[in-house]
Amino acid sequence: ETEEREVAKKVLGKIENEDKWFDWKQIKCVFTSGGGFTADAYDLFIISLLTALIGRVYYPDVRYYPDYYCQAIGWPNTTYHTSSGDVHHVCATKWSSQIKWLNANQPGWTLNDALMHAPKDMPTNSDYALKSVALIGTLVGQLSFGRLGDLLGRKAMHTATMIIMIVAALCSAMSYGTNPDGVIGTLCFWRFLLGLGIGGNYPLSATVMSETATAKTRGTYVAAVFACQGLGYLIAGTVCLILSKIWDGKEDGRDFLWRTALALGCAPPIATLWQRMVQPETERYEIMVKGEVGKVAHDVLGASEEEAKRLQVKKKPPSWSKFLSRFGWPLFGCASTWFLLDIAYYSQNMFQSDVFTIAGWLPAAATMKGVDEVYWTSRAQLIIALGSTIPGYWFTVATVELMGRIPIQVMGFVLMTTFMGILAGMYNELKTNQVSNFIALYALTFFFSNWGPNSTTYILPSELFPARFRSSAHGFCAAWGKAGAIIGVFGFGILKDTPNTNDGLNTALWLLVATNFLGLICTYPIPEPKGKTLEDIGEDLEDLSGMNSLPGDVTKGEPTKGDIATISPEMMAIPPVPEPVAAPAPTVGMA
């Protein structure tokens, strides 16, 4: 396969030499891959804005209902426990205090006004299931579609994830049942399916963008795809603000609001579906995984059909044992840092309602209607997003090729550890007497998570591994991240809800300090890929037919053979097909 290897070097060398920052092919790839990530963020983020409203609709806190209304609907005036251990409160025990508030703040109120102010009393299991079931689906999707992306191709699986997301987003809005548990159960089913599509989009978007970009622009463009998460946050918050104004005061407005918001999650994938369907398979996948060197040489270098036919490599089954012996430590570093980062990142989201209340951005639940709660929560989320989360993404885009991935990740973990340590050590003082400093530290933690490990943990697995394992390895690392997210939602949610709330929050904050510090330590095995081609990092060109053990150590940054960045334009020509040699004429009269 010597000739095929040399032609592959020339093809990839030409791609690498096309290193314009504003290359239209790469811009289109950012649009198609980023559209999926916008949908990912929208769908994962918007449920946190709607859970309280859904709880008010299907699980109202009947302590705020009048006694005569409870009797009319057949609600027992006793406290009882469900099989899951949740306590349903005695009806009407807070009705008298609610009347006082309504008389003082809403003269002329009606019974319907009073009922609309009842907060949610959703069972704990249903609450956590609604918030985390999409994360569980995402974990499964990352593992399954990550592997399928290597086996069946980036393009086909990329398109499949978009179709799943479109269907699941629309069906989520049509979740119905004969009772509240039935509605939540149906919604959880569709959100699990939605998570499958979201999860598949993680490794595929990163891999497609990484394989399309050049060594000089790769970090910037992969970071730009991930930064589309910020756009998803922005759209989700804005949609909820608009819908809360549209449906405010309308009959059945609460139910229509959450259903409309979930249905609109199909818009970003629909907008990019066609472009994904017509986007060709990446040249690196065609060469390194399928072995179609001649086909790509025909498309990129203009090789003749005869030359293309003979430049075909028969691929061997990939060797996972050799891959792990070669890239095991970088894989561990990427997976463990993503796991630890997401524990911290998602658990921070669990504290947002407390932060918003401390800041005075979110009124007490019983003083708002459900639609009002969506408005105020969305408004507060947008303040944090615009002030810290979204700028952090774009600081990474601007600096990742200047600073490198590892310095940004180390900086982020160090500062997150520092800010969380201050919040934990001075929690009561900050919350009581220094609210502005409390908010600033909380916002800075989000800022440096996005200008830090939240972005780099997504970028690095798309660069550090050979093409035959790239999508699988990225999906594996991303799945560990989502495992951390699930721990953050469940574990830190339980800590937060301990009987003594301050103790629970303080304990959680100290655990987050330790988690961020461990993330800093686990960054050590990860090499810096800045400025290197994917083939030099993954050593793909050393053996086109399979993954073999090769000289040079990628974990130590040692050089490997065949640096395609050194290929000059003059070296691009493919050797011509040799002319057939005529057989010599037979000799007559030989004894």
Image: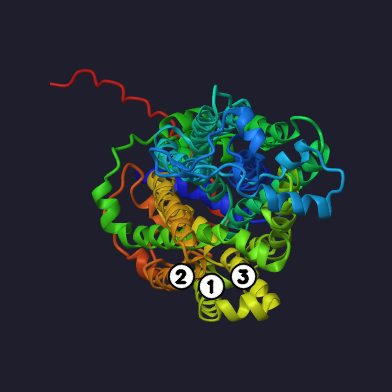
Q: Amino acid at mark 2?
A: Asn
Are the residues tagged 2 and 1 within 8 Å (C-beta)? Answer: yes
Give percent across and percent down for residue 485.
46, 54
- Choose the circle earlier in sequence order: 1 or 3: 1
Q: Amino acid at mark 3?
A: Tyr
- Give the structural element (helix, strand or loop) at label 1: helix
- Choose the circle earlier in sequence order: 3 or 2: 3
Most distant residue in the right direction: 108
> Which image quadrant for residue 270?
top right
The label shown at residue 416 is 1
- Give the structural element (helix, strand or loop) at label 3: helix
Are the residues tagged 1 and 3 within 8 Å (C-beta)? Answer: no
Q: Amino acid at mark 1?
A: Met
> Which image quadrant for residue 312?
top left
Give percent across and percent down for residue 569.
59, 54
Q: CA distance from mark 3 to mark 2?
A: 14 Å
The label shown at residue 304 is none
- The residue under the point 41% across, 31% down is 310
- The residue under the point 57% across, 48% down is 209
Q: CA distance from mark 2 to mark 1?
A: 7 Å
Most distant residue in the left direction: 591
Relative to 207, 537 lies left or right: left
Q: CA distance from mark 1 to mark 3?
A: 10 Å
Tag 2 residue = 516
Callout 3 crowding tier (Cα within 10 Å): few <14, some 14–19, many ≥20: many
Decide if residue 565 is in sight here: no
Tag 3 residue = 442
